[in-house]
Image (tube, grey):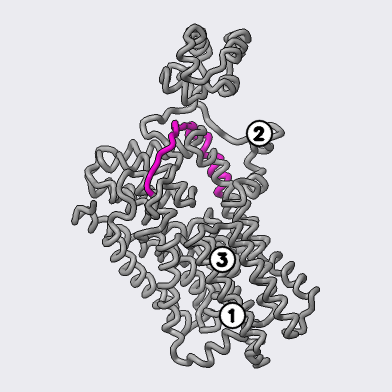
Amino acid sequence: MGKTKRDFTKMKTPHTYVIIFGVVVFAWLLTFLVPAGKFSTEEIEYQNANGETSTRTVLKQESFRYSYALDQAFVFEQLETLQNNPEALEELQVPKEGLEEILAGGQKELTQSALDEISLTDDTLYELYGEKIYDTSKKLHKTARVWGTDDTGGFGFLNFVFEGLTSGDKYGSAVGIAALILVVGGAFGIIMQTGAIDAGIFAFINKTKGLERLALPMLFFAFSFGGATFGMAEEVIPFSMVMVPFVIALGYDSIVAVTVTYVASQVGNATSWMSPFSVAVAQGIAGIPVLSGATFRLIMWFVVTGLAATYLMVYGERIRKNPEKSLTYKTDNYFREHIQKTSDENKPFLLGHKLILGEMLIVLIWIVWGVTQKGYYIPEIASQFFVMGLLAGIIAVIFNLEGMGINDVASAFQSGAADLAGTAIVVGMAKGILLVLGGSDANVPSALNTMLHSMGTVLSGVPAWLGAWAMYIFQSLFNLVVTSNSGQAALTMPIMAPLADLVGVSRQIAVLAYQLGAGFMDAFTPVSASLIGVLGVAKIDWATWAKFQIKMQGFLFALGTIFIMIAIAIGLQ
């Protein structure tokens, strides 16, 4: 009998959960090979985008050391000397009684955790005595157990889902983002149930026949501007709930919807001249004037946004003419069938629908105002969207839209939140990757810190143009793991800024490499909580998204490379 050939073209795309689990296992295996390392940290002050003084904890570039066991004999000897120096004890704020208790326990009982309790931290001892405090005969690895919790044996990588979901706080990933996704999902569940979005979309399309193609570039520039001015990212998730059915109704696909919203915002973030969460933080840490180089970046924003919008238009037109070519053609049927049903029913655009859409517009303006003027973030935004959903439900009940009663409003909220529960879980799973690598705290030993230090070492001494380009590549790759723009700036800029001096390029170019790498890659990495949230709304698996986005990433990377080379050529300062 002849062998049956396997048709690889019909192989199923791995589920997002499968991909993330594979990355988690790879990250865990990597920690067996890469020893843990850490940096000392310090608080620095810098002028933020508003001209006010802000502080941020950053790493000290020259303070990297591998994780070693404590040299008990050496440290114990120094403690005995320190005991007889009252002035040094007072300066270090070491309680004499606590030190005496540790010395009474003997050399063999000496641990770093005990020293931490009397203010003799690893950083303090390292600053006083250098690497003499360590037994440097063996580099230590920080590798998670297979299973475990912080309370039972220590963190195990098979608990990455729970640990990822419960990491952070309400102001960020993963707890805050996951909660925001559920609340926004519930709010839009109510709004979608009222039929206001559907009725509004068809009213718009019927009144703008022949002008549909103008919608994409206008929307792309609008979302890019949001990313450039106030770092729009998580805020895109609720916008996408409106934009996905709208863009599909225009004849495009959900990939176009995600690109015209989230990708556009990250293009703006990457080329921003004023974002308080990226370029302003990076410039402050690098020690250059905040918002300097704005003219160059403003030109770059306009050019890159225009070219990226053109790229989307070319793709969008191909899909509009032949929808079957779309990677998401099958999954988009969910939206197309809903749109077709609404179209067949020929629902009128009622006063209640208009009031709901007007109320939504007012709340969205309120959100933008709150973010830009009052510093509102995830907790406030979640509350604002809950208000939006609640008011929409009240209007629907009053005007009897879709026959909705009070219980229907509650059921719609539950259904909307349930639709995005899987997306919220992905946010936690993605954060688990970072936990397996040891976390992103520069002051805690991790494989990630070692990789950061190693890259800085490799780049020293290379030609200026190659060094700048390598910085760009490194920042792009680093963003695959650390997606927080301000967090990435705090981790990388203390190394990249002085490295730029050694390579022979300005620190302004080091900041440029950071923002381009971090911004563009945010539209691709599966670790981005915001991206996963938008993909969940559009019902797109990350693997499917990657097939499209990898080509656009190549296009954006080429544009970034060109602008970095232009910056070097003109001597951007």
- Give the distance between the C-alpha atoms of the residues marked 3 and 1, in whole angstroms: 19 Å
Residue 429 visible to an observer of this rendering: no
Secondary-structure class at tag 3? helix
Residue placed at 33% from the left, 36% from the top?
A: 457
- Give the distance between the C-alpha atoms of the residues marked 3 and 2, in whole angstroms: 35 Å
Does residue 484 sit above or below 322 in this rendering?
above
The segment highlighted magenta reads 23-47
Secondary-structure class at tag 1? helix
First of labels 3, 1 by sequence position: 3
Tell me which amino acid carries mark 3: Ile
Of circles 3 and 2, the one toward us is 3
Does residue 292 sit above or below 90 in this rendering?
below
Secondary-structure class at tag 2? loop
Which residue is most to the left?
570
Q: Which mark is residue 358?
A: 1
Does residue 9 sit above or below 319 in this rendering?
above
Q: Nearer the viewer, residue 386 or 558?
A: 386
Is residue 46 in the magenta section? yes
What residue is pinned by disc 2?
A: 154
What residue is pinned by disc 3?
A: 237
